[in-house]
Image: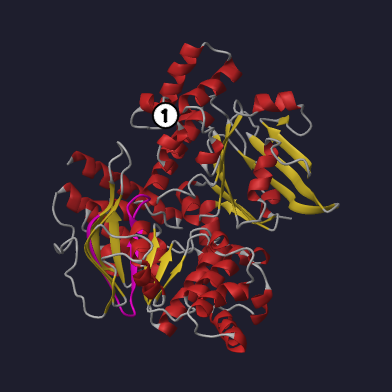
Amino acid sequence: MSQVNETPARTTNDGVPVLEVTDLDVDFAVDNVWVPAVKKLSYSIKSGEVMALVGESGSGKSVSSMSILDLLPRNARVGGSIKLNGRELRGISPAQMRGVRGQDVAVIFQEPMTALNPVFTVGAQIVETLRVHYGIAPSKARERAIELLGMVELPDPEKAFNSYPHQLSGGQRQRAMIAQSISCDPGLLIADEPTTALDVTVQAEILDLIRSLRDRLGSAVLLITHDMGVVADIADHIAVMRQGEVVEAGPTLQIFRNPQHEYTKALLEAVPHLGQGGGEDDVVDITEAMAETVAAVTHQSSPVDGRPHVEDRDDTDAVLNFKDVVIEYPGRGRVKAFRAIDHVDLVVRRGEVVGLVGESGSGKTTLGRAAIGLLPITEGHLSVVGTDLSKHSRALTRQVHKNAGIVFQDPSSSLNPRMSIGDSIGEPLLLAKKFKGQELTNEVESLLDSVRLPKSYRTRYPHELSGGQKQRVGIARALALRPQLLIADEPTSALDVSVQATVLQLLKELQREFQFACLFITHDLAVIDILADRIAVMHKGRLAEVGTRDAILRHPQDPYTQRLIAAVPLPDPEVQRERRELRAQILAAGSDE
């Protein structure tokens, strides 16, 4: 029996929980056999409370939440009780359920681009929701929709009302979907991984928004996530799920401070967070550095020693060297050329890991693709492992690929589904004419050993492997030619937290063993704190700041870097509460300048 079942139901003011789930079972029919996905799940949420369901992929979090609104596929079988404000939802008619959806319970989905209809404007979709549930006149619905878009803090609500989803940024789309979700003032808000695809600064803004809406509307919030930093930032209570069951539950602070179940302990230990790279006391040091930053910004002085935003150049042992590089995407017709990289200087030296961080659209991936010869530069000088790539050509790119490898963000799409694992890893060796026959087989098995995969996996295909195993294959393939440079483009962002920790540890070990230079591209500062020797911060195509890991993360000089670090949630409820207050002060001080 889980701890949730043993805990008395948390109730609203009138004594009834907003949501009460009791002994929920969900099974799926697979090849005429019922396969359990959720087993005897029980919890309750009161008005104004945030309940977090946490766990890794396949734990049953999203399945259990979708069963509340009867949104599961036809091969699903649901048992148990689901009560909304004391009313049993199990067994009600489809028409009655349509009335519940949107009006009483709303969902914020993980990916707004797929949740919003691409052929209708944002405003039209909110208006439709209002008219279906309230039957109000189009003019009144339009007025209310614009008011809602303002409520979710979109900078120009009227413009957003007339925009199509693709015309908004990721954060703006998420805000628009939240506006649609709260249009009928629902008593229960289900947030299914609402910040997974967002940058840390946008994530912090969305969490602030959900917190504000909860307080303003008094809604109960069911948060589904695998991000323990997000949980620490906003949740009141936690239920930890594994393989369809709750293994531990309780108040957020209790779970973080004194976890009882071994799985919960492992989950918390696997979470990367700022401070891991420099010792046990660094979490406090980072918070203190934020306080110094608040004082410095408030008094308009340098927070530390006046170090320049970009460190002095030293091209000694440079494996990758950008000098005054400009990269533009050519224009078409009336569309002007877009400058993605604007006069960037960056060096990656032999044996070091340089973290390239920044938000979506900052130019990180563009720079990484240029480093591997996949994009030509427009101006400046680019040298990759001794090859001058300033003038792009296929011959030069082939030369670079002999000495540089790349690990992509999505392991599933980067491997050929028709090639065995052994053939995928061995392909670079075969094309380079390094090995063939039994020698090639031996080398592939050696590479599988190096990424801690069994030799027997050589004959398997990508669909037979988990996400983490496929990423290990991607790393083995990238290292097949023993490159002097490795480009890692968000290699862990698509992985569960425990798998992410394993892959990061593997990369650290391999880098120490093979001593390759590495440009590690990510928006996750906690990940880069574990790996990097130096960090380069990108903002709108330019380098805002470059320096050692400790200098950038502990004593940031550039206002953008300060905001970026302040937005990173820490998996500690008390420390995160303090950091949230400091972040608000940094933003307020910055807006006053």
- Give the answer, above or below, for where 540 lies relative to 403: above
- Give the answer, above or below, for where 226 lies relative to 113: below
Left or right of 230? Residue 380 is left
Q: Is residue 301 magenta?
A: no
Quadrant of res 2: bottom right
Q: Is residue 358 magenta?
A: yes
Quadrant of res 557: bottom left
Q: Can I make out residue 532 in this image?
A: no
Left or right of 70? Residue 226 is left
Which amino acid is tagged 1? Answer: Ser
| Residue 244 point in image, percent of width and height | 70, 54
Q: Identify the residue shown where x is 40% and y is 29%.
A: 160
- Give the answer, above or below, for where 283 lies relative to 88: below
Q: Identify the residue shown where x is 37% and y is 73%.
A: 400
Q: Nearer the viewer, residue 413 or 288?
A: 413
Number of marks in the image?
A: 1
> Seen from this angle, which residue lies furthest right?
32
The residue singled out by tag 1 in the image is: 163
Q: Nearer the viewer, residue 299 or 375?
A: 375
| Residue 86 point in image, percent of width and height | 70, 30
Q: Can I make out residue 189 in this image?
A: yes
| Residue 333 point in image, percent of width and height | 32, 38
Q: Nearer the viewer, residue 421 or 210?
A: 421
Badge 1: few (under 14), some or many (20 or more) residues near its Cα, within 10 Å? some
Quadrant of res 473: bottom right
What is the span of residues highlighted in magenta in the rendered image?
342-364
Left or right of 387? Residue 76 is right
| Residue 476 point in image, percent of width and height | 52, 75
Left or right of 142? Residue 371 is left
- Quadrant location, the N terminus: bottom right
